[in-house]
Every structure is written in C-alpha cells, then in structure tokens.
Amino acid sequence: MDITALSALLAATIIAGTPILFAATGELLAERSGILNLGVEGMMLVGAAFGFISTVNTGNHWLGILAALAGGGFIASIHALVTITLRGNQVVSGLALTIFGSGLSGFLGKNYQGAPMPYQFKPLNIPVLGDIPFLGPVFFHHDAMVYLCIIIATAMWYLLYKTMWGLTIRSVGENPQAADAVGINVARVRYFCTIAGGMMAGLGGAYISLVYAPTWQENMTAGRGWIAVALVIFALWNPTRAILGAYLFGGVEALTFRLQTMGINISSFFLAMFPYIVTILVLVLVTIRRRQDAGAPEALGLAYDREER
C-alpha cells in the first residue's frame, strides 16, 4: 500500500470512528452514573431520522443536529423515567427502547427512504496544518463534526476526572447510598447523565445520515450502537481510551471497504461481519485480562431507592 492509499485509509478510519465515538461517549457518561443504557442503537436511529428529516425540510444541517439531539434526549428521558423514577430493569428498558427507536425511525423516515442529502457538511480548510504532507490529509481535512466529537470526548475526560461535577457523577455510580448521605441528589445526577448520553447517541446517528452516508435508509446505523456499548467496556470506562478504541473499530470498518475496492477475493458476507467479530474478540480479551479490575462502576445497572438506604 502506497503513502497516498494509507493516508486515505487513515482519514476514512477517523470518519468511520466518529459516530461510534459520539455514542460511546454518551454511554460512558450514563454508565459512570450507574445507568446501563442498552437503547443506544435505537437512540442513534432516532437521531439519524430526526437529523435527516429536519435538515431536508429546513435546509440547515445545524438545525438537523439540534433535532437529533432532541430526538436522542427524548428516547433517553423515557429510559431515565423507567429506570430511575420507576426503578425498572435497566436491561429490559434499554432493549425495548432499541426496538421502539428502530420502529419510530422507520415510520418517520418512510417518505424519505433512499433520498439523498442536499445540504451536506463540507470539510474544513485548516490553513498550514492541512498542507502538512501525509498528516494533513489524515487529520486536518475533515468536517466540523469530527473535531467537535474529539473535543467532546476530551472534555468528558476533564469533566469526569478534574472537576467536582465529575467526582459527583462517579460517586453516584460507585456508591449512591454514600452520595445521598452527603446531600447529592442521586436521581437528578442520573437523569442528567442518562439524557445527556442519549443526546450524544442521537448526535452519532445524525453524523451517519448527514455526513458518513448522507441519505436515509431504515436501520442505517447497522449495529454501531451495540459497538458503542462494547467500546465502553473495551475502554474501561475511560473517555481517552474510548477515543482510541473508536478509531480502532473505525479502522476495521474502513479496512473492509478498502478490501472490497481492491478486488480481494473475500466473501462480502464475511467482510460485513468482520467489525462485529473484532468487537467480540476484543471484549473477550479485555474480560480475560482485566477480570479482577475491569473498572466498571460498582452500582452499574442497580436501581437506587433512598427509602432502602
């Protein structure tokens, strides 16, 4: 592979990893507060549908982004109501919302099936940096959403580990009883993290329908929400590791497309499965190596009732 082809592959890796990183960052925030959200796939689909439909009808992709945030936040608020206020099973709620999000997005996008996106994000022209050989095309010829994603993931690390807000979130995820005892409103923190996480998932879905594959197709997220959930485990609930992990999975996806265009005689069905096979292998390896110190919040997936304190 020559330098130009390698540069193109790495650039495609960053683009392919961006929607996964958006969703994984949101899921990481929710899980750090103790809420397991398996509805990420459904929230991404709703975000993709809301973002696409709003952009087509308004002609403004930033309004589409706001609509995607609202859509993902709306689905996440249902999950928060069920799991925090009603103390329902978090796994069941998340799976139900994945099915609901898939159906809702398919219904809303029925009249837009296969329609192209007329208003697309354009790559930013970054002076000087974009002209650097090899590195310029890889890192500095992307749309604004790519850089926004990296900024958000980095800010998430700062929030969780360098601020009092982050300490509050982590304490709620580790020991909600102790957090409640010192005056922290556990339900309020979990509501905020769950809804904000859903908004991030919606943003990841919007990136797919507005930038990565600028059209609308039913179930177009193609399992990326599940990869995002797995990525949180792979990253050991650390946003900086999530950045690297997202681009690892993005690289696997970009490589499958590159192999197809190179005419290598590999079954297209195997290539379609390849990113998910890698996801399973990574999870197995992480589980084996870090079984005793996986870094998961102690109260993850557990409903909190202050009356039982």
Image (cartoon, helix red, strand yellow):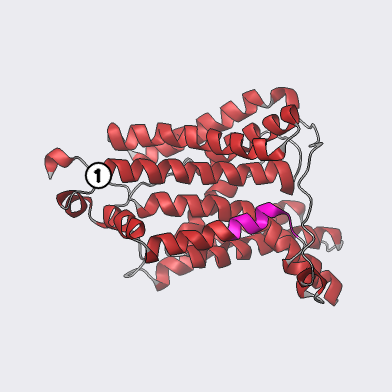
Element carrying mark 1: loop
The answer to whether residue 284 is visible is yes
The answer to whether residue 45 is visible is no
Q: Residue at (23%, 51%) from the top-left corner?
A: 176
Q: Which residue is mark 1?
A: 185
Q: Is residue 194 left or right of residue 186?
A: right
Amino acid type, mark 1: Asn
Instruction: Determine the image quadrant of residue 93.
Output: top left
Q: Main secondary structure of the magenta part?
A: helix
Q: Residue at (23%, 43%) from the top-left corner?
A: 304
Q: Is residue 49 left or right of residue 286?
A: right
Q: Is residue 257 left or right of residue 205?
A: right
Residue 16 is situated, as x and y percent measured from the top left of the image, at: 68, 56
Instruction: Determine the image quadrant of residue 81.
Output: top left
Residue 274 is situated, as x and y percent measured from the top left of the image, at: 66, 58
Residue 121 is situated, as x and y percent measured from the top left of the image, at: 76, 47
Range of magenta residues: 142-150
Q: Residue at (63%, 40%) from the top-left corner?
A: 65
State which quarter of the image contains the C terminus.
top left
| Nearer to the camera, 216 or 223 | 216
Q: Is residue 38 magenta?
A: no
State which quarter of the image contains the N terminus.
bottom right
Neighbour class for label 1 at 10 Å: few (<14), some, many (≥20)?
Answer: some
